[in-house]
Amino acid sequence: MRIEEKVKRESRRDPEFARWVRSVAGGEDIRRCIQCGACSSACQLSSYMDYTPRRIINLAREGFKKEVLGSFTIWLCASCYACRAQCPKEIKITDIMYALKRRAIREGTYPARFPTAVMAKEFANMIFSRGRVTENYLVTMLFLKTNWFKFLGMSRLGLGLLRAGRMSFFPDSVKNRSEIKTILNAVDGK
Amino acid sequence: MNLNDKISDKAPARIGFYICHCGTNIAGALDVPAVRDYVAKMPGVIVARDYKYMCSDPGQELLGKDITEHKLNRIVVASCSPLLHENTFRKALEKAGLNPFYFQMVNIREHVAWVHTDKPGATRKAKDLCSAAVRRVKFHKFLEKKKVPYHPDVLVVGAGIAGIQAALTMANAGKKVYLVEREPSIGGHMAMFDKTFPTLDCAACILTPKMSAVKSHPNITLWTYSEVAKTEGSAGNFKVTVKRKPRYVKEELCVGCNDCIDNCVFKEPKFADEFNMGLGKRKPVYMPFPQATPHVALIDAETCLHFKTGKCKQSCAEACDRKAIDFNQKEEIKEIQVGTLLLATGFEVFDAAKDPYYGYGVHPGVYTSLEIERLVNASGPTNGEIVLRDGRKPKSVGIIHCVGSRDAKTNKWCSRVCCMYSLKLAHLIKEHTGAEVYNFYIDMRTPGKMYEEFYDRLLEEGVHFVRGRVSEVSDFAMSPEEEGKLILRAEDTLAGFVRRVPVDMVVLSTGLTPKKDSQTVARLFNIGRSPEGFFQERHPKLAPVNTFTDGIFIAGCCQGPKDIPDTVAQAGAAAAEALALIDKAYIELEPDTAFVVEDTCSGCKSCVPLCPYTAVSFDEVKKKAVINETLCKGCGTCVAACPSGSIKQNLFEDEQIFSEIEGVLTND
């Protein structure tokens, strides 16, 4: 174990990040949080998280950007909305989680080689460029960017699927790709 | 009342004995029928019964029926504590035409059933106690409760919001109220506050109308700059001595024009101003604050040149065209008769210097909450501008909760108001300066109407809330951003790491403590204090404004920390309790008082100085001791002290006590 200073100075805080969290859809109520922990207790995945949802909310509104965007928590969130249903202050926690995921992908601060994050990123890229997901491409990218040894172990399953006609080498795509881009840009407010 | 009662003092005792099951409270712990049968065999016992609930209506009726049918003249009930039901059974006797003092109660619930687990042993103890009561009750005598008139006037001590509210309530009910205040003006701590939570209405705006109402009320006699020096007597008849300190300005002449202040030889204010927590300056002749009531100046002899050197040209006196200044004013002693005392002596703010880690008095940027109240206030030393001692506007402010609260090293209790006033100050500081505000708290305690909503509002205003007790305030910078700042170090227990937060200004949310002289005051009025020093209420839930001394009530923070709404409610409650006593117009005295057998009293005066209630005096003509029944509380001190056994006490005469002891010891 490396011994390092753990105390957080004020310079670690990024007020701009806190402001951004408040500006995203669902983030406007983050200051209401009274840190009761109902979200963490409702969350079925919190037992695997490095920061519980309650701590993510606390860190995000204080502007501890590095901790939040580097956490596994946002990637473990299965979007079941249990936290949102339980929250006494009706904070849209799941929506905030999505926003944090997007920002982490954009800034490349997600945990390296963590499958959920990599898959989310590749999934989004594919939709942006082709409008559709091609599963074998997605799986290939996922394994190459996380653990390509595992890819070798999967080769027999891949060949079987190929023989059965369940997988294709040709990438799927929508007819008019520029339209899907326009739609997606509109969603992002661009 | 039955006229035959007097005769039946001598008549052979016909005793009725009743043992109560109290559901299973008693019956479950001892053998009730065995005790009943044991007592039934005792001489003089005519009836012995057990019953499920003696205190119930059928239980009392059973008792009354037996008295008539069996011509009983003594009753013993073995049940719970006399505190609970002695009065119930005495009334039942009275209803059946028997003197209520031909009665003895045995406490076999608290003294036997609840404290023993061994059933045969418990039964034996119950038998002993019941046999003692049966033996003693034979010697009970006909007694009467004395009625004495209750003086309708009231003295309220302390004129903060509690005292003001109580005085106004009683004065409005037509009672004559004396209101005594130690400070030169009424208003107390509330007058020092800027805004009040959670509504943020201005403290002065809601308080000053009440202050003027006190001043102008025809039923209120207001004595400020005065203290109670002595109290004597008891409920309904207190004699109180009040000391009026000289303010060297004649109250009845001064109109508060401030000419004396403007013309003082000190051209500039030079001395620390108490009302502004020393943040402002005043002259030796001063007005405590603009809304001071009474609106009368006063001279501080400690700083006045005339009193210090005798060489002042007295320009203040010359400037006063009403000739109100009187350097020869002396302390005045007032003696008053009142029936009721209402204490609203308030609290003291915790001395922040006692917590060395927070650097109060060391770092100039550390303030107490009360100092901030004065800084925010428009009539305060900075005209409402929040600035540091060097004139800078703070860009970041840290508010530390629980200073002198919830801490075994200082005060263990939660001061109840600090969370809310810290939120209020955070709001005001943010509003006035736009600074980043950090609240460091242990728990956020906001119970009260619209209080939690106020917390929500502060959260949404973007005040930082760090859950963790600050361990130290230091000026030791460990990074460039901390240079020239005060650094607060606390674990953010919700974030899960330790933080260092540099700020320009630190506010210590100091707790509420008992007044330094609360012990002296408690002794002065003969009331009790709880372990931490606040005045003790008679019952924490059911008699919260009463004290253990009849006729003395408490309200406000002298009883414990509380906010303004609770204080006002409690003051109203205390006033109502007082009015209930006053409007009854008399009080009944328990007859268990001491009396002197004049034939044998030798006049040695041993008893006179011993009485804690000054009830024993000496009749110089007869050369005998005299006991004032009204003052006697039945403590028995004089009875025990009398060398010739010439003082006796009703219900505790020798033959009664000895036969009771015999009863306990005669065990078969």
Image (cartoon, rainbow, N blue to C red):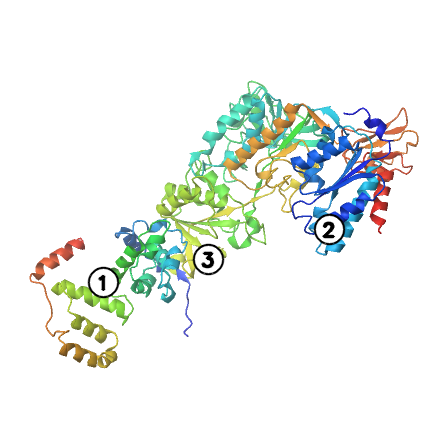
Query: Label 3 marks which chain's residue?
Result: B
Q: Tell me which numbered mark, 2 or 3, is placed earlier along the sequence.
A: 2
Q: Is residue B263 above or below residue A26?
A: above
Foreground mark, 2 or 3? Answer: 2
Query: Label 2 marks which chain's residue?
Result: B
Q: Nearer the viewer, residue B543 or B349?
A: B543
Q: Nearer the viewer, residue B453 or B208?
A: B453
Whether labels 3 and 1 share one chain: no
Q: Nearer the viewer, residue A49 or B603?
A: A49
Query: Which residue of the protein is positioned furthest toward the left in this rendering?
Result: A175
Which residue is denoted by mark 3 in the rendering? Answer: B490
Which residue is denoted by mark 1 in the rendering? Answer: A106
Q: Secondary structure at mark 1?
A: helix
Where does the image place residue B287, in percent across and percent down from the top left?
53, 29
Which residue is denoted by mark 2 in the rendering? Answer: B31
Which class describes the residues within 10 Å of circle 1: few (<14), some (14-19), or many (20+)? few
Alpha carbons under labels 3 and 1: distance apart = 33 Å
